[in-house]
Image (cartoon, grey):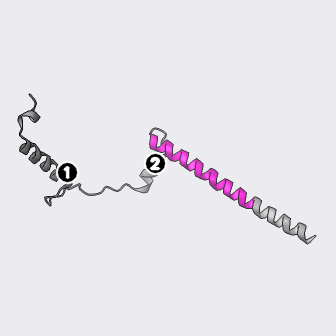
Amino acid sequence: MSQHTLMSTQERKMQAAAICREIHATDGTKMDLGRKVSAPKEIMLEELSLASNRGSRLFKMRQKRSEKYTFESIQNEANTQHNVRGTITENLS
């Protein structure tokens, strides 16, 4: 027989309440997670430059997309300015 069937309804409710208190920490105790570890920027960039892990591959793909967007934006601005100048010179002629 399982332990669940041997317990009374009141015991099951008390056990469930104890688990909820433990999860939500309503009794005032807090878990000590320790000090946050900080990694130097050079180490993080070195890790991202490696091709061995998934995070670095995703980072490189994101960099390529952002560079492409930046390049396309610069091209679009240049074309827009060129078109505006061409329209102004045509109107003045």
Relative vertical location of residue 19 with respect to residue 25 in this rendering, above or below? above
Which mark identifies residue 46? Answer: 2
Instruction: Decide if residue 30 is on the left or right side of residue 82.
Output: left
SS at badge 1: helix
Instruction: Decide if residue 91 is on the left or right side of residue 47.
Output: right
Residue 67 placement (x, y as % from top left): 61, 52
Residue at x 6%, y 34% (from the top left corner): 6
Residue furthest to the top: 1
Instruction: Decide if residue 11 is on the left or right side of residue 39.
Output: left
Residue 76 placement (x, y as % from top left): 72, 57
Residue furthest to the front: 9
Relative vertical location of residue 9 with respect to residue 25 in this rendering, above or below? above
Relative vertical location of residue 76 with respect to residue 12 in this rendering, above or below? below
Where on the picture, by quarter, is residue 36?
Answer: bottom left
Q: Which residues are magenta?
A: 53-78
Residue nearer the viewer, 57 or 8: 8
Residue 54 placement (x, y as % from top left): 45, 40
- The first of marks 2 and 1 along the sequence is 1
The alpha-carbon separation of the residues under discs 2 and 1 comes to: 38 Å
Q: Amino acid at mark 1?
A: Ile
What residue does disc 1 label? 23
Which mark identifies residue 42? Answer: none
Q: Residues within 10 Å of mark 2 (few under 14, many from 20)?
A: few
Query: In terms of secondary structure, what is the magenta stretch mainly?
Result: helix
Residue furthest to the right: 93
Residue nearer the viewer, 17 or 68: 17
Quarter in which the N terminus is drawn: top left
Residue 30 placement (x, y as % from top left): 18, 58
Magenta span includes 64: yes
Magenta span includes 2: no
Q: Amino acid at mark 2?
A: Glu
